Image (spheres, rainbow, N blue to C red):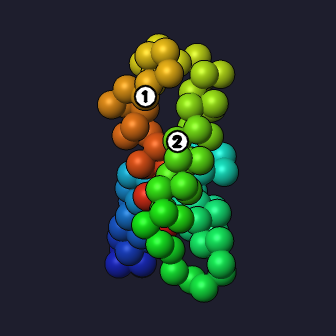
């Protein structure tokens, strides 16, 4: 009985630790790896050229800037029409977490 209780406790703690370590993604929206890849792959050959990549990343940047303008912490994420380091990190995190 003690072994079963100990095992259940260990599993519960493991699940709790895994959940706590996940990044909060409430702000992610449509800026995900899969969405950007699909947007970039214009000819649908499951590959992207440098130009397709640059075009898609430009669109991802514009999407993120539009979201940041409406955010309560906009001054931390952007200055005028430029993304701060925190804003850029947020964009990269959005793309990475969607992979």
- Residue depicted at x 62% and y 40%: 63
Q: Secondary structure at mark 2?
A: helix
- Residue depicted at x 48% and y 63%: 51
- From the top left corner, tell me how far across and down residue 71 is, in percent: 60, 22
- 50 lies above or below 97: below
Marker disc for residue 5: none
- Residue depicted at x 65% and y 78%: 43
- 62 lies above or below 57: above
- From the top left corner, tell me how far across and down residue 29 is, in percent: 66, 46
In front: 66, or 45?
45
In front: 52, or 79?
52
Point out the image quarter for the N terminus: bottom left
User: Quick one: label 2, few (<14), some, or many (20+) residues within 10 Å?
Assistant: some
Cα separation between marks 1 and 2: 9 Å
Marker disc for residue 61: 2
Q: Secondary structure at mark 1?
A: strand
Q: How many marks?
A: 2
- 18 lies above or below 49: above
Q: Earlier in the sequence, mark 1 or mark 2?
A: 2
Tell me: 3 left or right of 59: left
Look at mark 1 in the image and give the residue it sits on.
83
Asked if the residue under mark 2 is in contact with the one under mark 1, i.e. CB atoms within 8 Å, the reply is yes
Q: Kindly indicate the quadrant of the structure image that contains residue 45.
A: bottom right
């Amino acid at each position: 009985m003690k072994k079963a209780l100990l095992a259940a406790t260990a599993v519960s703690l493991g699940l709790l630790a895994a959940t706590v370590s996940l990044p909060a993604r409430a702000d992610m929206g449509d800026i995900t790896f899969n969405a950007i890849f699909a947007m970039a792959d214009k000819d649908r050959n499951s590959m992207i050229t440098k130009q397709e990549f640059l075009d898609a990343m430009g669109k991802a940047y514009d999407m993120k800037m539009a979201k940041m303008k409406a955010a309560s912490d906009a001054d931390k994420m952007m200055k005028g029409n430029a993304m701060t380091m925190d804003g850029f990190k947020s964009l990269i995190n959005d793309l990475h977490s969607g992979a």
